[in-house]
Structure formats: structure tokens, C-alpha cells
Image (cartoon, rainbow, N blue to C red):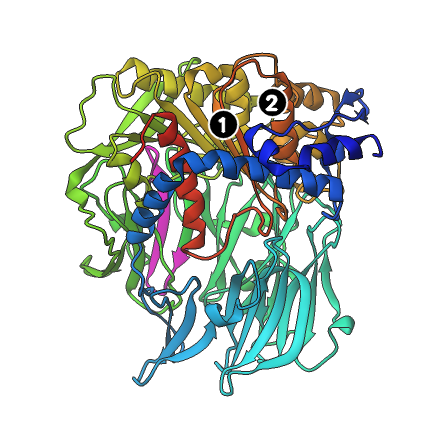
């Protein structure tokens, strides 16, 4: 490391110089070894798990200084964009109250508040009570997030988890809702989910491994006792699994959910008897996934057992423990992907995907043949469940949104079908939905598969091959990128852009097979789909070939890195947010968070076939002496999902090898993690910077 010190300090001295010229990271010989051979990584030194190395920090600060100096050219535009974007946020807003027990719960925002204020109001009427004020709690922190909030069954205590570093390592705290003061009990180093037992003093929580940050143990805490003595209820030995906790909607059971990419296990505990032993809904069986809720002495189960697109089954309370005892609840439709369900006393609500769209279907228990889907008048939309805590209700709450329609919270009476609008998201700043138009196109990929693409543009747009295009994609983990309203993109639409979401393989928009066709040894389909969508939109004159921009984050950042290597000449610019670009090195290191439980997504590079395939598309390993488009890359120093050194090393290698003069910027948030800045206004500054970068490349100077 001594060889690095003179070079780095020379780079840092006189920042006026380094701000004008791109930082050049020193190279230091290092081999990343594996059972399948060694690879040279001259930038490996940038990794510092303690995040204290002065040379590394100096280099990151030099990158930030360079970005600040260069972006000053479009700073007035960034400021204007920021004002536009936050101008579309209703300052004094609140969520629609939902009922649970004797209260209506909601989250409200003050005019200038960055964080939510968690409140409740008695069902019988009266003043609202502030349970937790995120603005007050965040004071003195550079990052703040409230995750899970759960009120005790007797409605007297609030348990909540918070993160003050952006590392997704949460502390569990408890508040007496009568006094507003916290109890002395506090437990750090946790996952966010928790569950109360019905005795109002026992809480189940999940402890993380301090090195890998994986969720590994479920413990039980009794208020007033020493957390150091909290017993372990369950320990996960297989580190390919994530743990989470749920409580059934009827409040009778606590679920310990173990979930990997391909397999699920669920253990249940009687919430009335927190000292009782756990019971398995079924023996955990490889490559069978499911979720479950409880109603009327039986478990309602959504599973992919012999049904890749998931089917509904059930099992009686006294028959749990064996998979073979599960029985069919509704006929399986292989053409419809069932995403989630809510069992009510008299109805079953189903959130399902058909033709790439997310919709809701209502099934009466008494007459399942009379099932009805909630209809939409728009060609591209998404409907998903809102909070529905009361099982005995006939009213279902759901959210409706499209690329032109801001979120609507709707209540539908499942008996009559009558719909009531509870809230239409208000978008200030002069936004009018009828100024914009959305459509769905189907793009033939190179292997003949049709890829759905959602488009939106301002009315008056002409498909003549002159418009700029902002194309977004993700394509991993089976996560679907639904065509929902995004107020930020209005700033691009009003400047003549077409916005496209490429629903590429690796997501689940078209069902489970769509996901399977975009992971492991089929991952390259994800990248090819994105490139083929670009080619189609240009060929069909939706966009000017010289004004195409691509964007993606995290695993979508891997997508950005792959397309930059495979077809970067198609793009004027690329935005890669917290990109997962050093896939082989990361997946070889089982001490890094999210490695072992990602093997079923990417492959285990200790195996030769997986190593070779992953190496063939790894963005970091495939940087070449070639031309690349203009690029803006972002990362967070405390990112626990994609460690900061991945995008940093990638940028360093790009700078050393690329043969063009196009700008390449790396912006590091030194106080945040994977999601960037916290706070509803602060995070919009980052979006404005990205849009400013794009518009500056097009010569926009307003």
C-alpha cells in the first residue's frame, strides 16, 4: 500500500487542478483467486471494509470534487429541475387512514418536513395522537429511516426499527404511547421486521450477522429483560436464505419465513402462547415456494408447487406439517401469474398479472364461479393492494396508477362492486394528466420473444425520429417494473422526451418463466432484451438514435454496465445508480453481504460453468479499449447491498481503458447507503442532478 500514498496525495494536492482533470486511480498488482483461476485486479486496494483508509477516502473525495467542478456547468439547470420536481410534491400531505382495532392509522407530512409523522385517531372520534415524528427523531443524523412500526395488541406500545447510517442495520426501540417516552429496551444490529405476541410484552425480532449482515437468528425479547439473554427461537444455518417475520391478519399466529430464490419454509408460533414450540406448515422442500395467511381454522396458501405461475391451496390447522396434506383451493390458470392474495371472511382478493399488467380479481367464497376483475380504461396501468387489516370487512382498498395517472387509493365494496375514490394523489405545479399519453408496444427480441415496453410522452409528440428517449430497465430477482406514475419524469416529458420502461426478462411481468429466462445461465437475455428494445424504438422512429439515454440502478446498474460493454454506441449517455458491476469478485467472497443468498440468482462462481458464464458478462471484467458513451455513476459509502468499491473500481478501469473523450463522472454519497439520501426532498436533488447531466449533454442551457 505504501506505493499508493505518493500518487494519491499528489492527486489530492491543489484540488483546483484535480477538479479540472479526472482523477486517475493508482494501480497496484493484486490477484483475485478462485478454484477456477486468478484474475488481475489493480484497483482492489480501493476496498476498505472499515471505510477509514485515508488513501481510499482521499480518492473518493477527489472524484466528488471533480464531479462538483464539472457539474457546475449545469448547476443552474439542476437547481431549476430540483425546484420543478419538489414543486410536484404536495408539502402537507398524508396517507389514507386505515383501520386496525380501535384506531385509524396514517402518516402525515408537514410542509417542510423531510420525514413522516406517524399518527392515529380513535375510531369513535377525537384528536389525532402523534406516535412517532420522524423529523424529531432524525435530528443529529445525516441519514434516517423508520422501517417497521407495529403497535402492541392492547394498543398501548409502539415497537419500531430505525436506521441512522444507511447500512440497513436497524435498531429496535419501544415507545409507551401514553407518555410518548421510549422504554429503556433497545436492540441494535437487526433486520427491520418484527412481530408482537398477544401477551403485549413479548416481541420476536431478527438478528443479523455482524460481518455478512445476513439475517440469521430469530430471537424473543420480553420487555424489561436484558436483550443479551434473549433466547434464540430459530437459527438459519443455510446462508442462501433470508429471514422475515409476519403476523397473520387474524392475529392468531406469528410466521418465521425463510426464503431463498427457489425455496420457502414457514414456521408458525401461536401468538397467544409465545413460549410454545414452532411448527412447520410443511417440511422445507427444495424448489417449492409459498406464502400463507390464516382464516377460519385453515391456512390459505399461495404456492408454485407443480404450478410455476402459482396456485391457491389450503390446509386445516390440524393437518399442517406435511406438503401432501395441502388441498387445491381454486383451479390453476397457467396463463395468469398470481402475485399475492388477501383472504377476507367472505371474499378472496387476488393480485395477478396477465399480459404483463397487474390487476385485481375478487372471488366470493360462496360462489367462486362469480369472480370479477376490476376493470381499467387505460391500456397500461397497475393495480396493487393497499393496507387491508380488517378480515371481517367487505371493502377492499387498492392503489391504481398509470404512467399518466397519479396514484388513486380506491375502496371497492366486494359485494356490490361499487368503487369509492378515497384519495387522488395531488400533483402541484400545474400538472394535468390529459396533457400526456401512454401506450404499450411489443418488441421482438433477437430470439423471437416479444418484450413488453411501456411508453409515455406529452401529447403533441410526433413519432418522426427526432425525440430524445429515456429508457429504464431492471430485469432481476423477479422484480417487476410496473408502469406507475412517476412525477419526476414530467420534467423530461415537458422537454420533449419519450420515457420507456423495458419490461425485460429477469423480472416477472410475464410470469415466472419470464424470470427464469433472465437469471443464471440465461442472464444475457436481460441485456439483449434491453438493447433490442432500444433498436426497435429507434427503428420505429420513437426516438432520435443520437439522443437515447439509458438508466438503471443496483442490479439494473449491472444491466447498464453490460449494455455499455455490449452496445454502448447506441446511447448518448448512461446513468448507472449504485451499480452491481463486479459480479464475479463479489460472488466469490462469502463475507460480503448478499453473496451466499444470491447464488441461485447469479450462480456460484466457485463452479466452473457459472464462473465462465458470469465472467462473460461481468461489466468490470469486460471493460475494453473502446469508445463508451457519457456516463454518470453513483454510489454510497455505506451501501450494504452493492459495496461502494464496485462502482468506484469500475469507473477507475473505464478511465484507464476507454478511448473516447466523453465525460465519465462518479458521485459518491459519503453519508448514505443503497437508497441514496434519506428524506423526501433531499433525495430529489440526486434526481435533478441526473436529469441535468442528460440535458446538458443535449445542449440544454435553461
Which residue shows up at 69% across the image and 41% down it? 58
In percent of width and height, residue 675 lies at 52, 48
Q: Quadrant of the N terminus?
A: top right
Which residue shows up at 52% across the image and 36% down it? 67
Q: Which residue is mark 2?
A: 654
Q: Is residue 543 above or below residue 328?
A: above
Residue reaching furthest right?
2
| Residue 587 in sight from this viewpoint | no
Instruction: Name which of mark 1 and mark 2 comes first in the sequence.
Output: 1
Q: Which residue is mark 1?
A: 631
Residue 335 disc label: none
In percent of width and height, residue 664 lies at 53, 27
Is residue 185 found left or right of 315 in the rendered image?
Answer: right
Real-space Cα separation, disc 1 to disc 2, in angstroms: 10 Å
Magenta segment's dominant SS is strand
Is residue 486 found left or right of 291 in the rendered image?
Answer: left
Is residue 6 found left or right of 658 in the rendered image?
Answer: right
In percent of width and height, residue 327 lies at 49, 50
- Between 280 and 322, the one nearer to me in the picture: 280
Residues drawn in magenta:
342-360
Label 1 residue SS: strand
Q: Is residue 701 above or below residue 302?
A: above
| Residue 584 in sight from this viewpoint | yes
Residue 369 shown in magenta: no
- Say if mark 1 contacts mark 2, CB within 8 Å: yes
Q: Is residue 561 above or below residue 245?
A: above
Residue 354 shown in magenta: yes
Amino acid at each position: 500500500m505504501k506505493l499508493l500514498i505518493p500518487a494519491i496525495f499528489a492527486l489530492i494536492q491543489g484540488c483546483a487542478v484535480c477538479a479540472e482533470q479526472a482523477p486517475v486511480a493508482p494501480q497496484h498488482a493484486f490477484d483475485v483467486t478462485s478454484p477456477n483461476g486468478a484474475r488481475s485486479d489493480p484497483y482492489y486496494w480501493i476496498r476498505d471494509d472499515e471505510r477509514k483508509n485515508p488513501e481510499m477516502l482521499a480518492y473518493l473525495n477527489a472524484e466528488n470534487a471533480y464531479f462538483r467542478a464539472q457539474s457546475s456547468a449545469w448547476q443552474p439547470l439542476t437547481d431549476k429541475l430540483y425546484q420543478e420536481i419538489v414543486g410536484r410534491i404536495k408539502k402537507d400531505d398524508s396517507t389514507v387512514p386505515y383501520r386496525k382495532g380501535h384506531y385509524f392509522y396514517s402518516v402525515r407530512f408537514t410542509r417542510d418536513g423531510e420525514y413522516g409523522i406517524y399518527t392515529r385517531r380513535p375510531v369513535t372520534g377525537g384528536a389525532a395522537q402523534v406516535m412517532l415524528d420522524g423529523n424529531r427523531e432524525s435530528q443529529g443524523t445525516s441519514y434516517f429511516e423508520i422501517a417497521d412500526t407495529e403497535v402492541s395488541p392492547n394498543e398501548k406500545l409502539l415497537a419500531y426499527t430505525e436506521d441512522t447510517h444507511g447500512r440497513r442495520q436497524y435498531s429496535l426501540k419501544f415507545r409507551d404511547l401514553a407518555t410518548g417516552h421510549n422504554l429503556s429496551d433497545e436492540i441494535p444490529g437487526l433486520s427491520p421486521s418484527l412481530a408482537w405476541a398477544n401477551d403485549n410484552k413479548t416481541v420476536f425480532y431478527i438478528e443479523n450477522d455482524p460481518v455478512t449482515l445476513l439475517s440469521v437468528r430469530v430471537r424473543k425479547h420480553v420487555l424489561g429483560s436484558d436483550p443479551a439473554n434473549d433466547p434464540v427461537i430459530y437459527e438459519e444455518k443455510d446462508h442462501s436464505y433470508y429471514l422475515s417475520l409476519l403476523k397473520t391478519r387474524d392475529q392468531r399466529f406469528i410466521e418465521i419465513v425463510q426464503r431463498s430464490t427457489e425455496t420457502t419454509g414457514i414456521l408458525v408460533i401461536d401468538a397467544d402462547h409465545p413460549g410454545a414450540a414452532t411448527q412447520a406448515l410443511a417440511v422445507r422442500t427444495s424448489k417449492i415456494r409459498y406464502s400463507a395467511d390464516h382464516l377460519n381454522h385453515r391456512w390459505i396458501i399461495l404456492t408454485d408447487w407443480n404450478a410455476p405461475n402459482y396456485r391457491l391451496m389450503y390446509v386445516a390447522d390440524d393437518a399442517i406439517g406435511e406438503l401432501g396434506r395441502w388441498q387445491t383451493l381454486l383451479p390453476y390458470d397457467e396463463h395468469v401469474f398470481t402475485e399475492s392474495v388477501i383472504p377476507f371472511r367472505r371474499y378472496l382478493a387476488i393480485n395477478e398479472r396477465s399480459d404483463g399488467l397487474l390487476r385485481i380479481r375478487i372471488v366470493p367464497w360462496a360462489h367462486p364461479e362469480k369472480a370479477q376483475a376490476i376493470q381499467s380504461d387505460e391500456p397500461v396501468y397497475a393495480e396493487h393492494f393497499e393496507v387491508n387489516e380488517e378480515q371481517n370487512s367487505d371493502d377492499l382498498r387498492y392503489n391504481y396508477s398509470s404512467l399518466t395517472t397519479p396514484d388513486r387509493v380506491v375502496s371497492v365494496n366486494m359485494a356490490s362492486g361499487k368503487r369509492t375514490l378515497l384519495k387522488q394523489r395531488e400533483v402541484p405545479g400545474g400538472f394535468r394528466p390529459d396533457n400526456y399519453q401512454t401506450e404499450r408496444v411489443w418488441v421482438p427480441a433477437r430470439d423471437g420473444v416479444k418484450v413488453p415496453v411501456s411508453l409515455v410522452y406529452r401529447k403533441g409528440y410526433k413519432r418522426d425520429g427526432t425525440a430524445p428517449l429515456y429508457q429504464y430497465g431492471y430485469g432481476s430477482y423477479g422484480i417487476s417494473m410496473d408502469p406507475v406514475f412517476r412525477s419526476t419524469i414530467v420534467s423530461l416529458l415537458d422537454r420533449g422526451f419519450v420515457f420507456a420502461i423495458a419490461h425485460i426478462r429477469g423480472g416477472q411481468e410475464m410470469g415466472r418463466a419470464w424470470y427464469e429466462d433472465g437469471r443464471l445461465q440465461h442472464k444475457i437475455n436481460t441485456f439483449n432484451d434491453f438493447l433490442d428494445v432500444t433498436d426497435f424504438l429507434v427503428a420505429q422512429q420513437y426516438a432520435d438514435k443520437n439522443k437515447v439515454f439509458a438508466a438503471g440502478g443496483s442490479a439494473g446498474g449491472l444491466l447498464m454496465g453490460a449494455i455499455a460493454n455490449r452496445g454502448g454506441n447506441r446511447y448518448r449517455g448512461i446513468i448507472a445508480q449504485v451499480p452491481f458491476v463486479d459480479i464475479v469478485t463479489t460472488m466469490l467472497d462469502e463475507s460480503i453481504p448478499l453473496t451466499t443468498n444470491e447464488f441461485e440468482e447469479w450462480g456460484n462462481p466457485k463452479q466452473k460453468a457459472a464462473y465462465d458464464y458470469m465472467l462473460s458478462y461481468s461489466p468490470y471484467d469486460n471493460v475494453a479499449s473502446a469508445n463508451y458513451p457519457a456516463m454518470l455513476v453513483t454510489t454510497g459509502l455505506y451501501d450494504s447491498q452493492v459495496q461502494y468499491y464496485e462502482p468506484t473500481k469500475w469507473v477507475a478501469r473505464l478511465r484507464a481503458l476507454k478511448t473516447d473523450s466523453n465525460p465519465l463522472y462518479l458521485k459518491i454519497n459519503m453519508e448514505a447507503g443503497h437508497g441514496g439520501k434519506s428524506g423526501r426532498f433531499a433525495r430529489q436533488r440526486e434526481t435533478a442532478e441526473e436529469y441535468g447531466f442528460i440535458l446538458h449533454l443535449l445542449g440544454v442551457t435553461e
